[in-house]
Amino acid sequence: LIAGASFVPNSAATALSNQEHERNINSLVGVIPALGSAETLQVVDGFAGIRCASPDYLPQVGAVPDAAAFLRDYAALGFDAKQAIATAGSYLRGLYVNVGHGSRGLCSTPVCAELIAAQINGEPRPLPAALSQALSPARFLIRGLKRKTYSGMRSLQNTTSSVSDTGLEIK
């Protein structure tokens, strides 16, 4: 039986953790009491890695924005965050991302891939417009302008954070 995953925000640790194994076993026994007690289960193997997550814990899905064009075209948001901008965003031609799903990747990446396919092919979105917009990689540029926290290209370089992920195999 392979079960368990830990989530340790802002950790880049890739070493196996007995504490995380214990926590995963206790959670598993809590959900499936028929497995017995935590004391009777034995960890036979484990793995650890890093998951990519964005600061707002939503994945970044869609066309990659042309940062310089966004800063130019949406500069007015730095003076009035509610300003309506009639100009459509500029994106890097042919470059799309589907990243930062964190611990929900197995569930969210398929529908997000469908969203990208719809964008590429000019088809109707499989998600509501508001959700599609919330997932846009350009959101960090827009937020930075509105909050007056955007300085140069720094924002694009800091849009992901890591979380440690430890899984285990028990028998």
Image (tube, rainbow, N blue to C red):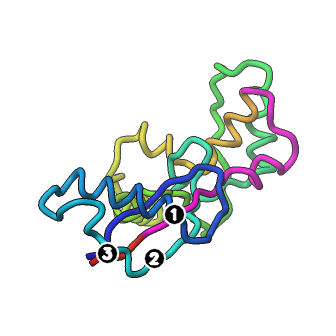
The residue that appears at 50% across and 57% down in the rendered structure is 102
Q: Quadrant of residue 45?
A: bottom left
Question: Is disc 3 surrounded by few (<14), some (14 to 19) or many (20+) residues within 10 Å?
Answer: some
Q: Is residue 18 visible?
A: yes
Amino acid at circle 3: Ile
- Residue 165's disc is 1
Tell me which numbered mark, 2 or 1, is placed earlier along the sequence. Answer: 2
**Most distant residue in the bottom direction:** 44
Q: Amino acid at mark 1?
A: Asp
Magenta residues (range):
147-167
Nearer the N terminus, badge 3 or badge 2? Answer: 2
Residue with the mark numbered 3: 170
The residue drawn where x is 75% and y is 39% is 73
Cα distance, mark 2 to mark 1?
11 Å
Question: Which residue is outermost to the left?
Answer: 34
Picture quarter with the N terminus: bottom left
